[in-house]
Each structure stands twice: as C-alpha cells, then as structure tokens.
Image (cartoon, rainbow, N blue to C red):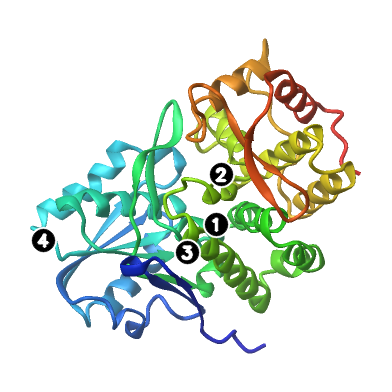
Amino acid sequence: MNAPDLQTVAIDLADRSYHIAIRGSLFDNPLSYAELPKAHFALIVSNTVVGPLYAQRLQKALSAQYAQVFTVILPDGEAHKTWESLNLIFDALLANGCDRKTVLFALGGGVVGDMTGFAAASYMRGVPFVQVPTSLLAQVDSSVGGKTAINHPLGKNMIGAFYQPLKVVCDLNTLKTLPERELVAGLAEVIKYGPIADMDFLAWLEANMTALLAREPTALAHVVKRSCEIKAWVVGQDERESGLRAILNFGHTFGHAIEAGMGYGNWLHGEAVGAGMVMAAHLSLRLGLVDMFFVKRLSILIEKAGLPVKAPVLCSTDNAARYLELMRLDKKSEAGEIKFVVLDGPGRAKVQAAPDHMVRQVIDLCCSKSLLIQ
C-alpha cells in the first residue's frame, strides 16, 4: 500500500501562524526544517523511551542547519511532568551556553511537548521551538495550539504558558513503534472531535475503528489531518481559551480528576479522558441536552477503541466528594464553581455549570459496576 502524500494544516494566528506537516518519513528529513530560522544552537528534548529510537536520527537531520545540536533526555511519563524535569532542560541550555536564537525540538509525546514548549517560553523570556510529536495523542492534540505546562500535585497543567511553536512535524512512521496502550490512549483525543464539532467524523470513526487499531496508514493519516483541522479552526478563533477553545476539553474535567486522584501515570491521559467523556455525556443527558441513544452511541465507540468507559473509585468513603474536590481545581472553575464541557446536542458543545447533586449522580453511576452502555 502506498504511503499517504504530504498533507499540511495551517494554524492562522497572524504573526504567530505556522503549519502542521503530516506524512511518513518526515522527522529525519533535513528538508522538514529548511525554512526554520538559522541559529548556531539547537536542543533536542526527548525521553528515555523515544530518545534511543529517534534522537540520533533527528540530530543528524538538524546538523545540516545548526552548528551544534545537543540532546537532553528526560524521564518518561506523566509522573515526571514536574519542575525537576523542566530544570533538566534549563540545565542543558545553560551548560551549553545556548543563546536566545537557540531552537528547541520536542521529540516525543504530549509530556515532552508540553515541557519543551514551557521551557522555550521561559528561557531568556522566549526562544523558538518545534514540535516533533511521536505519539498519536500528541499528533492529534497536544502538539497543536501552543498550550504548554507542567503538573502540580494538586492539579494537572496548572503551571504553564500559551506559546506557539514554529512548526509541527507529524511523522506517521513513528506511530509504528507506539505501544498499543499509547495508541489506544491517543484515540480518546481523536474521538472527542466528533461529538463536539463533526458528526460526519464520528460516523467515520465508527466505520473505521478496526483499521485505526490495525495502524492502517491512510486511516491514521486521515484522523491526524482531520483532528488537526478541527483544532486549528477552534484555536484560530480563540487562542487563549477565553471561550470557544474550552470545548476541546470535553471529558477532561472528569478526566483530570481521575489522573490526579489515581496518581499521575497510573491511568494514561487518554484513558482518563475516555472515561471522562462517558461521564460528560451522562451529565449532558441529565441536563436535557442529548438523549440516551447518543450517550450509548458515544460510549460504544469509546469502548470499541479499547478505552475504559467505567470510571475508577477514587475514595472508599465519599467518592463523589473526592471527585468534586479535585474538579474544583480545574482551570475552567470560577470562584469554586465547576464548569463542565457538555454536549449541546450531537456535534455541538458548550461550557456550563451543573448542580453538585446532579454531578454526584453522574459520578455514582459511572463508577458503578452496573454501568451498562448497550
């Protein structure tokens, strides 16, 4: 089967505009970086899993453009999205005398991308960076749009900055080495685009989930491109999440509570979002915004992707209270009032509050062994 042709998606943000390149055999091709600004230094940021696979090849590709290319390897996983890991990047920059023209390259998944972007936003008050995402989740979501952050023990992504990359290079070949669990976790961020923005895409996912799980190249190329197109459309209208962009967090208010409550890294981000989308759909149902048929339809697709549809119990005494406590730390909360992304009918979403008693009912149902989706 022929590899998909090069595809591009534009992020239109005036003087901060850039494009996403999507195809196989991209990240180690010097031509992928030829239009970037010239500099003496480049720093590749990767982790202990991705670095041994790809860092040397990227370093060779960049050596045509940069006199000195350094690499820093971070520990792998959400549990290491911390100040300590962030300082490893600053240590490498300072130890090598990197100046403000230095270009950072984020080679890895969402954790590497978020931390590299935050380091770029902070070092010398801002240096350029490029996203080279190697996971499905990063290619369809976290590498696009300029949200950078680290975690705090009390909340996910609470310390960060909006800072756009110069370019995003999505090499589909890197998905071949992605562990199965990581591939499945990435599908959560793909699935979310259907119910919030594109019902035709949701139907396509229902028809092609088997091909995606089998890593069929044209299917993967389609989901990366369509996901990036939807995110580009949203980010182009609301770069700093003052309104519309918040709909991209469908399932994330519940999902971030799961990640924090379980301990970062015990559930992957996409796994938590999968269960979180089921919870958000049930909340939408109780608010009278969608019907049970649609909740079941979405839940069946999430389960078909291999994602959890039943939420974990975070506390044996008052589980709902623990969820509510964690969700009050969500960035959308205002004066302690939790704001949820809910479905305003199929293919539409909005942000609104919901009464605690209703949220408790949703939590109790979705953490119950008796939760049925069929």
Which quadrant holds residue 5?
A: bottom right
Check whether the beta carbons of the residues at disc 1 and disc 2 lie within 8 A of each other: yes
Q: What SS does tag 2 mark?
A: helix
Which residue position is annotated with label 4?
99
Q: How far is disc 1 from disc 2 in space, using C-alphas? A: 9 Å
Check whether the beta carbons of the residues at disc 3 and disc 2 lie within 8 A of each other: no
**Outermost residue toward the left in this view:** 97
The dot on residue 137 is 1
- Say few, some or many: other residues with alpha carbon within 10 Å of mark 2 (under 14 / 14 to 19 / 20 or more): many
Residue 238 on image: x %, y %:
47, 54
Residue 348 on image: x %, y %:
70, 52
Numbered disc total: 4
Q: What SS does tag 4 mark?
A: loop
Q: What SS does tag 1 mark?
A: helix
The dot on residue 134 is 3
Q: Quadrant of the C terminus?
A: top right
**Among numbered discs 3 and 4, the one appearing first in the sequence:** 4
Kindly identify the amino acid type of the residue bearing the numbered disc 4. Answer: Asp
Which residue position is annotated with label 2?
269
Which quadrant holds residue 189?
A: bottom right
Kindly identify the amino acid type of the residue bearing the numbered disc 2. Answer: His
**Outermost residue toward the top in this view:** 317
Check whether the beta carbons of the residues at disc 3 and disc 1 lie within 8 A of each other: no
Q: How far is disc 3 from disc 2 in space, using C-alphas? A: 16 Å
- Is 36 drawn above or below residue 124 in the view shown? below
Kindly identify the amino acid type of the residue bearing the numbered disc 3. Answer: Thr
